[in-house]
Image (spheres, rainbow, N blue to C red):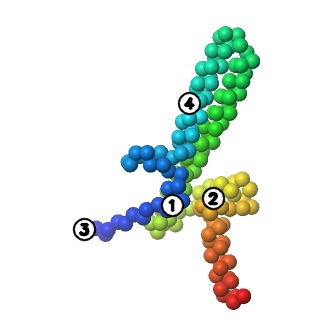
């Protein structure tokens, strides 16, 4: 027999965005919001086409604006869902003892702050947890 393979369960931060609606297939809330925004965009597109066919151009412009807003929301939720999947896979590989490369960007706060700040789920060397551990170790060693 070969060596036993152990699998580590993903941490709680990895499972946070997942809502188990079906035991075998978890659906993230990001995916739900993406589907809802997409459905709303489709309905507003139909309403805009109907308004144009009835020569109601002002409401059609409002519907078209709503389509743009909902399409952007669907794309944003798709990006969040994909990032949650990547972070979950990175955390799983890390729990198995591998040393995966940091994601690009290392965390969403780093992207928003142009690398000046990092959040707890940072996959790079700037993780908040690692920084706090380093400060605590320096404090213990310094005896302050």
When the figure is inspected, residue 18 is found, relative to residue 124, above or below; the finding is: above
Q: Label 2 vs label 3: CA separation?
A: 39 Å
Identify the disc placed on residue 12. Answer: 1
Q: Secondary structure at mark 4?
A: helix
Identify the disc placed on residue 30. Answer: none
Q: Residue at image x 60%, y 61%?
A: 121
Q: Is residue 99 visible?
A: yes
Counting residues from the N terminus, which is met first, the one under dot 2 or under dot 1? Answer: 1
Q: Label 4 vs label 2: CA separation?
A: 32 Å
Q: Label 3 vs label 1: CA separation?
A: 33 Å
Q: Secondary structure at mark 2?
A: loop
Q: Which residue is mark 4?
A: 39
When the figure is inspected, residue 54 is found, relative to residue 29, above or below; the finding is: above
Q: Residue at image x 31%, y 69%?
A: 3
Q: Residue at image x 69%, y 89%?
A: 143
Task: Using the rendered view, name the quadrant where residue 108 is placed.
Answer: bottom right
Left or right for 61, reference 105: right
Q: Which residue is mark 2?
A: 106
Residues at circles 4 and 2 in contact by the CB criterion of under 8 Å: no
Left or right for 95, reference 45: left
């Amino acid at each position: 027999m070969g060596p036993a393979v152990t699998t580590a369960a993903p941490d709680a931060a990895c499972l946070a965005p997942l809502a188990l609606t079906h035991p075998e297939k978890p659906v993230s809330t990001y995916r739900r919001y993406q589907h809802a925004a997409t459905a709303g965009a489709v309905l507003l597109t139909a309403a805009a086409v109907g308004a144009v066919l009835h020569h109601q151009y002002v409401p059609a412009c409002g519907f078209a604006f709503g389509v743009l807003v909902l399409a952007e929301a669907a794309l944003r939720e798709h990006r969040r869902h994909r990032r949650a999947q990547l972070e979950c896979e990175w955390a799983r590989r890390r729990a198995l003892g591998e040393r995966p490369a940091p994601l690009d960007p290392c965390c969403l706060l780093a992207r928003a702050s142009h690398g000046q700040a990092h959040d707890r789920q940072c996959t790079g060397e700037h993780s908040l947890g690692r920084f706090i551990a380093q400060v605590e170790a320096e404090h213990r060693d310094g005896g302050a």
